[in-house]
Image (cartoon, rainbow, N blue to C red):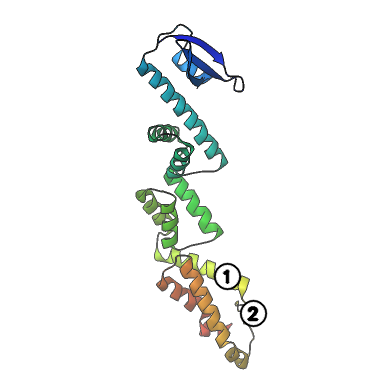
Amino acid sequence: MIITKIEPQQRKPHRKSIYIDGEFAFGIHDEVLLKFGLRRGDHLTPEKVVEITAYEEFRSGREKALKLLNRKPRTERELRTKLLHTGYSETTCERVLAHLREARLIDDLDYARRYAQESMTRKPMGERMLKQRLRQKGIPEDAIQTVLREMFPSESEELRYALELARRRLERHSNLSGHSLQKRSSGQWQEEQTGLSQHKKRIADYLVRRGFDWETVHRVLEEIFSADRIQKE
């Protein structure tokens, strides 16, 4: 097997067409051409051709992965899924991911930390929901547990997040915030009991949907809707 011609591709001048024994064999990027030092007249074994074309696929997969990462951070599983869907082999995907890990361009633990911090700042959620979302993104279990310990170092931390979320919700959708309940007569207070119960249910349902357990939800309702507390205001 002899390379009889190497010519630039018309629409992609950075790529070369390789001809073996007078016939087109494969196309490669200039990077691959230089890496293997290919020249016209070189003798190639079938094994060498496999090595060259495998490296070309790796180079192409690496380029695709970098473009995906440039758009937004991604987990290893997200990248693997994208590459497989594009048509790259399992072997190439693992090779690309190993390269990106070594170059510190992907790090599932770092991704999980950033995702958790941004999510909890923007719209808090319970430990259960955060765990579920990290699993959906393909974060390894050990990394998930590390992040959960950091975000919820104690039970009081989850309660704090739940209180913050409930107060935001109450202020946005209700006229029963602490400020609006000031200076109300006892008659007005009794008339609003039905409405208050409805608000409590809405807040409770909302917190459960956000992944908080019933014990935390109950403590939040006691804190926000305590009759003694509201009357004292």
- Quarter of the picture containing the C terminus is bottom right
Looking at the image, residue 139 lies above or below residue 222: above
Give residue 45's quadrant in the image.
top left
Q: Quadrant of the N terminus?
A: top left
Q: Position of residue 2 (x, y in %)?
A: 43, 9
Q: Amino acid at mark 1?
A: Arg
Label 2, residues with CA under 10 Å away: few <14, some 14-19, many ≥20: few
In this picture, is 203 found above or below 153?
below
Label of residue 180 in the image: 2
Residue in view at x 59 percent, y 89 percent: 189
Mark 2 or 1, closer to the camera: 1
Q: Secondary structure at mark 2?
A: loop
Q: Looking at the image, which is closer to me, 91 or 11?
A: 11
- From the viewer's side, name the closer residue of 99 and 44: 44
Reading the image, the residue beneath label 1 is 169
Q: Residue at x 54, y 17 (%)?
A: 16
Q: Measured from the top left, where is residue 47 in percent x and y? A: 35, 18
Sequence-first disc among 2 and 1: 1
Q: Residue at x 49, y 49 (%)?
A: 114
Question: Who is closer to the viewer here, 95 or 28?
Answer: 28
